[in-house]
Amino acid sequence: MSYIKMRGWDVDNKKFLPVERLLFDINCVLISKSFYEEPKISRSLMKQTVITLDSGMTDHTHWDELLDKEKIAWLSAHFKNKPGNFTGKKIFESDIIKIHNYHYTILKEVKFLDGMFCVVSGIQLESVRHVMCEFHVKVVGNIFENKELILDKKMKLNKNEVM
């Protein structure tokens, strides 16, 4: 049996929460960090917490490119593994990815639309899996902690359009 992996962005505390189980009630959603602990009430989850899905894919980041705190977090979460087993950062819905080829580098938000993880290119949806095969892709942030990455990109595009 496989499980859908998720993470929750706590709007009030501005941090990600690990989510193992969701129980829906009329006015709130109960979040549990493991199957064995009692769920905690997240006050009106629709306003307080945003749940994002794991795409099941990892980017092209190498172990030596990680920050020390990212290395420690990965080793503590994967205590049986060694740095040589690191395959890249997990890609979640709402992550901001840097897509690079020989001619340009762009930033895109990962979305879950029409049953697939994708990035929006103009009016088209591009599958993240397809983008990963064609280009060099790295997770550089997410829309909750790094909104400025997407905002800066939009501002630069607007300036270029005026010129």
Image (cartoon, rainbow, N blue to C red):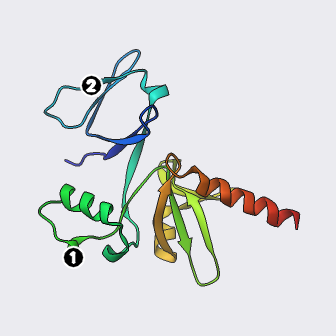
- Marks 2 and 1 sit apart, C-alpha to C-alpha, by 36 Å
Residue in view at x 49 percent, y 68 percent: 130
- Is there a contact, CB below 8 Å, between mark 2 and mark 1? no
- Amino acid at circle 2: Lys
Residue 29 at x, y percent in the picture: 36, 24
Q: Which residue is mark 2?
A: 40
The quarter holding residue 31 reads top left
The answer to whether residue 72 is left or right of residue 27 is left
- 38, above or below 125, in the image: above
Image point (34%, 44%), residue name: 6
Quadrant containing the C terminus is: bottom right
Check the image and name the residue furthest to the bottom. 102
- At which x and y percent is residue 140? 48, 62
Residue extending farthest right: 163
Disc 2 packing (10 Å; few <14; some 14–19; many ≥20): few
The secondary element bearing badge 2 is classed as: strand
Q: Is residue 156 above or below residue 100?
A: above
Quarter of image, res 20: top left
Q: What's the mark number on residue 150? A: none
Instruction: Looking at the picture, tell me which residue is in the foreground, 14 or 37.
Output: 14
- Residue 39 vertical position relative to residue 114 in the rendered view, above or below: above
Residue assigned mark 1:
84
If you read the primary sequence from the N terminus, does the residue marked by circle 2 or circle 1 appear first?
2
Query: Which x, y percent locates residue 72?
Result: 24, 61
Lateral position of residue 16 relative to residue 105, left or right: left
- The residue sitting at 53% across, 67% down in the picture is 98
